[in-house]
Amino acid sequence: MTASYCFTHAITRKPAVSITAGLRAVDIGTPDLARMLAHHADYIAALRSTGAEVVELEALEAFPDSVFVEDTALCLPQGAVVMRPGAPSRLGEAARMAPHLRALYADVPQISGPDSFIEGGDILTTETEILVGRSARTNAAGIVELTALVKDWGHTVREVFTPPGVLHFKTDCSLLDAETILSTKRLAASGCFDGYKVIYTAEGEEACANTIRFNDLVIMPSGFAKTRDALDAAGFKVLEVGNSECAKLDGGMSCLSLRFTPRG
Ligand code: CIR
């Protein structure tokens, strides 16, 4: 059973021209749309190379950050939960994703409490657990609601914490296989991965913690040679994709897709 990283489907959304107005913690430059589109095409090709079906959605100009589709839903085999993003400019993205999930899933509940906020970037799903990091975007009410919605779906929801100053829980970690997590030292220090095997990002390469295990590949941002070599040495099949433009908006590999195997 490797449902946590073997997938038949992914959904992506084309970057909008308005991406230059995307949210960022620190302004380190305006993203170059042409370069971002080229990286995005490489990313989709990587997903498809594993045999998965990739649904490419049209750009949404009204939502500058809408390329980061991961934040709009949590997809499990039993159903997909539509999130309620905590960033006000992103709240409407979730409703734009819901019909595409309903086309593939029979069960698509949504987080609906007016005070509940939760973004997919704060959720790491393993074979048995759904770890949800409280953050500036995800609050306790959102986690309580999610817990109730997925209670019969076979995973335990565990609330964890996103380090201060870090956008999302998964900014600092990713699942590599059923028992192995790639993590920054600052995140793992909280003990949230006790019981899992942890591979640490190399010193100074914390920015590559957000990778994805997608079928046989670990897809990671290019430019982090020491961590890449460590993953390689650990036996993972690593593929690097350029991420310089999304990184200007605090986006990494997981943010760019929803990955799932719908059960119907
Ligand atoms: C944001 O601040 O919401 C976007 N600029 C980046 C979202 C990245 N998403 C993710 O890590 N799941």
Image (cartoon, grey):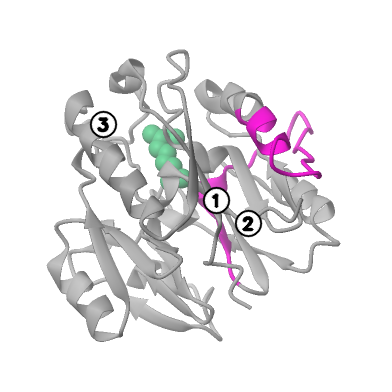
Q: Residue at x 69, y 42 (%)?
A: 104
The answer to the question of whether label 2 and label 1 lie on touching residues, with beta carbons closer than 8 A, is yes
- Position of residue 259 relative to residue 16, above or below, is below
Residue 98: percent from the left, percent from the top? 68, 31
Residue 100 drawn in magenta? yes
Q: Ligand 1: does it lie within 8 Å of the C-beta at label 1? A: no
For residue 16, side relative to residue 9 (left or right): left
Asked which secondary structure carries label 1, the reply is: strand
Residue 230: percent from the left, percent from the top? 23, 79
Is residue 49 shown to the viewer in this render? yes
- Main SS, magenta region, reads loop
- Position of residue 158 relative to residue 2, above or below, is above
Q: Residue at x 24, y 40 (%)?
A: 39
- Circle 2 residue: 261
Residue type pointed to by label 2: Thr
Identify the magenta region: 97-126
Task: Give the total number of marks visible in the rendering.
Answer: 3
For residue 89, side relative to residue 104 (left or right): left
- Circle 1 residue: 9
Quarter-of-image position of residue 226:
bottom left
The answer to the question of whether label 1 and label 3 lie on touching residues, with beta carbons closer than 8 A, is no
Check disc 1: other Cα within 10 Å, few if <14, some if 14-19, many if 20+: some
Residue type pointed to by label 3: Leu
Q: Nearer the viewer, mark 2 or mark 3?
A: 2
- Position of residue 161 relative to residue 258, above or below, is below
The single residue placed furthest to the top in the displayed view is 62
The answer to the question of whether label 2 and label 3 lie on touching residues, with beta carbons closer than 8 A, is no
Q: Nearer the viewer, residue 70 or 136?
A: 70
Q: Residue at x 75, y 38 (%)?
A: 111
Check disc 2: other Cα within 10 Å, few if <14, some if 14-19, many if 20+: many
- Circle 3 residue: 37
